[in-house]
Amino acid sequence: MFFLQVHTVDTDHPLTVGIPPDESSTTSTISQRNSIASHAHTKFCERRGIVHLFRSVSNSSLPNPSSQSTILFVVAVPNYLSYDDFVTFCGSRINHVSELLFIRNDGVEERYSVLIKLGNLTDADRFFSNLNGKKFSPSEAEVCHILFLMSVEYTESAEVAGSPPDGCTELPTCPVCLERFDPDTSGIIHTLCDHSFHCLCISKWTSLSCQVCRFCQQQDEKQACFICGTVENLWVCVICGFLGCGRYKEGHAIRHWKNMHHCYSLDLRTQQIWDYVGDNYVHRLNQSKVDCKFGEMNPHCMSHEGECGTCEYDENSGFNDALYHSKVEAIVDEYNRLLATQLETQRQYYESLLAEAKSKKEISISEAVEEALISKTQDIQDKLEKCVKEKNTVSEVNQKLIKNQEMWLAKAKQIEERELASLKSRNEKIHDLEEQIRDLTVYIEAQKTLNNITDSDDIKGGTLLPVPAKESSPANGRKKKGNRRRS
């Protein structure tokens, strides 16, 4: 049986969940929508909080008459399935639901949980039978996983919410599917790096590395030096796990110490730890090659089997045993302190390397930015100078064009004035010629008239009358003078 404790400071927010009408829907969808709308008594709410799921240690999580209840819990619903889609997914079974609570966690946006309360055990059992193990979407791999809950508690204290009830344990989540681990409902497999997964989830892996820490799960059956590949006289670094050959081979283990300053190395053959700084062994306990457990070694007898029959050591001496145990404990404490000191030194060393690398990175970034700014500024300056030169050239050309324009305007004005003067002179000449022609015409007609007159006495007694001039002009003046002369 399961128990649910929710750490939340929120309250239930009522929701209006339903399927909007669509004329293009099928008949089954319309009937389903009408059935959902007819049961308006179902209460839909939403709450935000962190869910803690606990399982009784003594009982199985599989549904049985003693563990069934009217409260169901859907562990994980993918976020692509909206509230309306989930109601549609429930189908006609939503009619028997009295309360539907959607629980969201602000830290997990890709899924949410659903708490369902039904009227009786029969409806709850039918709801579980119809929907448990069913895919949310035919095209997706997520499956609906439903649990029967014995109780649900809400608290504002994170410590209270995370404390399991008596006789219960909290179920962890799978790193792949994010659903709770339950050995009664699904197989669980543990990797070499001590991480757990569902069997179905781990079967989908395409790589050999762990999905949490990326540790390779396929180990070589025969270990070899990382550099030269030799399989003899191997030493593994206690700090980082580097596997190298000893000094009597190629010496890659001691080169690793000189390069990385990892001074502790374990001999894989004897399981003894060597200190490169002190140039001696630092182990105080022997480790069994069979069960990898630490065992006590006789402080006086050099035999690992206890009594060898060649020494006078008495195993029944309680004082020697107590003294030996105290020495072992002191040595273990000394080793632990030494290891902690070495790890702290390594931590400080790597932190200094990280700080140095960070400072170098910042310096290189600032230099690159400065060089980019200088280059950009130089390009802008070159463009500006080019634009200034082009502006000066255009100004010079403009000045020349203005001068040429003024010169041609002056020439055009002079030509226009000459044309006007020439036209005026021509008009005057034409006018004079017309006057002269008129005078000649009058004179010729007068001569003809005189020639036709036979009586000269009549002419002698005649009077000369002036002819009024139509306009004053030099030609008229000359004409009048000619007339006076002729008279």
Image (cartoon, grey):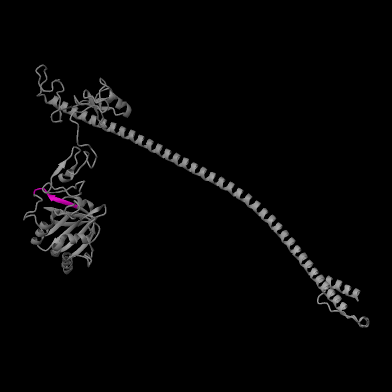
Most common SS among magenta residues: strand
Q: Is residue 194 left or right of residue 425?
A: left
Where residue 58 appears, x then y in whole percent? 9, 48
Q: Quadrant of residue 306?
A: top left
Q: In which quarter of the image is the C terminus?
A: bottom right
Q: In this view, does 437 lie to the left or right of 42?
A: right
- Between 207 and 163, which is closer to the camera in this rendering? 207
Query: Which residue is rendered at x = 29% and y = 29% of the image?
Result: 262
**Residue extent of the magenta highlight:** 52-58
- Between 277 and 126, which is closer to the camera in this rendering? 126
Q: In which quarter of the image is residue 280?
A: top left
Q: Which residue lies furthest to the left in this view?
A: 65
Query: Which residue is rendered at x = 63% and y = 50% of the image?
Result: 397
- Between 112 and 375, which is closer to the camera in this rendering? 375
Q: Quadrant of residue 203?
A: top left
Q: Does the magenta stretch include residue 126?
A: no
